Image (cartoon, rainbow, N blue to C red):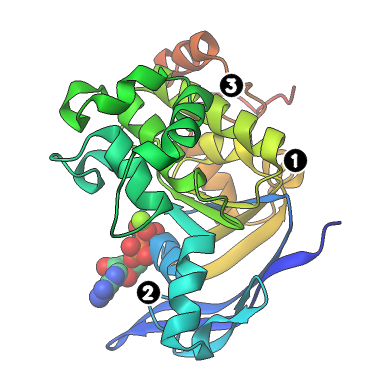
Amino acid sequence: MNETIVNVANLNVHFGSAHVLRDVSFALATGTTIGVVGESGSGKSTLAKTLVGTVPASDGEVWVDGLDVRHATRRQLADYRRRTQMIPQDPFSSLSPRRTIGQTLAEAIEPGRGRVRPHRERIVDWLERVGLAGSMMDRYPHEFSGGQRQRIAIARGLIVDPTLVIADEITSALDVSVQSQILELLAEIRDTLGLTMMFISHNLAVVQRVSDEVLVLYRGVVVERGPVAQIFNDPKHWYTRSLLEADPGSPGFTLDATALDAERSMASTPRGKASHQ
Ligand SMILES: Nc1ncnc2c1ncn2[C@@H]1O[C@H](COP(=O)(O)OP(=O)(O)O)[C@@H](O)[C@H]1O
Ligand SMILES: [Mg+2]
């Protein structure tokens, strides 16, 4: 069990003269979730793209699922990208408006074909797993709400049985109450299937809900990393503490829509020293 599936060592990424990731190192064990948190521009999406091989590293090691991603061949990468699924932030722009949901899911299973009939059962199964009805497979993206589209995006990512799932800000565009439903759903599926996941968000409370371990990124540097409880209850770095203070939903909050809404409305009230649990 718990073999290492992702191993990143001293990863550096430059965009021209901008040094966007600096000496990033971490490992991820099968069946666990690593949360990546940091404000906008800290390099979270770049880290995700380096893992899936769409952004080249300047130096360092990136091993995922036994593949040396930096030195993989085209063909190895093509196969690898099916095993490593990215769930996007904005499913509306990534779901084709002209395809039914069934066709989109079929296309994920069988790229370039999109024949629904041979995959009908699997598509219905996945729509139901994400809390939608199988009959919705004949509808188009515009007929769904933002939360439903995010459920569809989750189904599309998971229907191919990926070895690694990367969720990049998947709840950022959603209302707070819908956010919590999507997180609950993802956590439940993760537990049922034993998914291995990188979960990215600028919101520490969101990361807390689903992660076993957390990396805190600040301007491309991992300033703190450790088990989720340690990061929340005993943050060592000033930047982590500032994220906690800026975030009314944490620490010690449990993910419940009502509690979350209550916390949000209290956000303007200054907090004393946080009490845990
Ligand atoms: N393709 C790119 N070319 C040049 N700069 C980029 C590119 N992608 C991201 N950046 C820069 O890299 C930094 C990190 O971006 P990103 O990884 O998207 O951060 P985050 O996802 O944490 O918001 C930012 O300063 C961003 O402007
Ligand atoms: Mg990003």
Looking at mark 1, is its residue's CB closer than 8 Å to ligand 1? Answer: no
- Please name the residue shown 64% across and 60% down the image: 224
Q: Is residue 178 visible?
A: yes
Disc 3/disc 1 C-alpha distance (Å): 15 Å
Q: Residues within 10 Å of mark 2 (few under 14, many from 20)?
A: few
Q: What count of labels does the image hold?
A: 3
Q: Which amino acid type corresponds to the residue marked 3 in the rendered image?
A: Leu
Q: Nearer the viewer, residue 78 or 249?
A: 78
Which residue is outermost to the right?
A: 1
* Between marks 2 and 1 in the image, the one whose residue lies nearer the viewer: 2
Q: Which amino acid type corresponds to the residue marked 2 in the rendered image?
A: Thr
Q: Which amino acid type corresponds to the residue marked 1 in the rendered image?
A: Ala
Tell which quarter ligand 1 is in.
bottom left
Q: Which mark is residue 28?
A: none
Query: In which quadrant will I find the C terminus?
Result: top right
Counting residues from the start of the chain, the first of labels 3 and 2 encountered is 2
Residue carrying label 1: 229
Vertical placement of residue 90 versus 60, above or below: above
- Please name the residue shown 45% across and 37% down the image: 155
Residue carrying label 3: 255
Would you say the residues marked 3 and 1 are in contact, meaning their CB atoms lie under 8 Å apart? no
Disc 2/disc 1 C-alpha distance (Å): 32 Å
Q: Position of residue 163 (x, y in %)?
A: 61, 58
Q: Nearer the viewer, residue 267 or 255?
A: 255
Give the secondary structure at mark 1: helix
Give the secondary structure at mark 3: loop
Give the secondary structure at mark 2: loop
Q: Is residue 90 left or right of residue 234?
A: left
Vertical placement of residue 143 versus 68, above or below: above
Residue carrying label 2: 54
Q: Residues within 10 Å of mark 1 (few under 14, many from 20)?
A: some
Q: Quadrant of residue 174?
A: top left
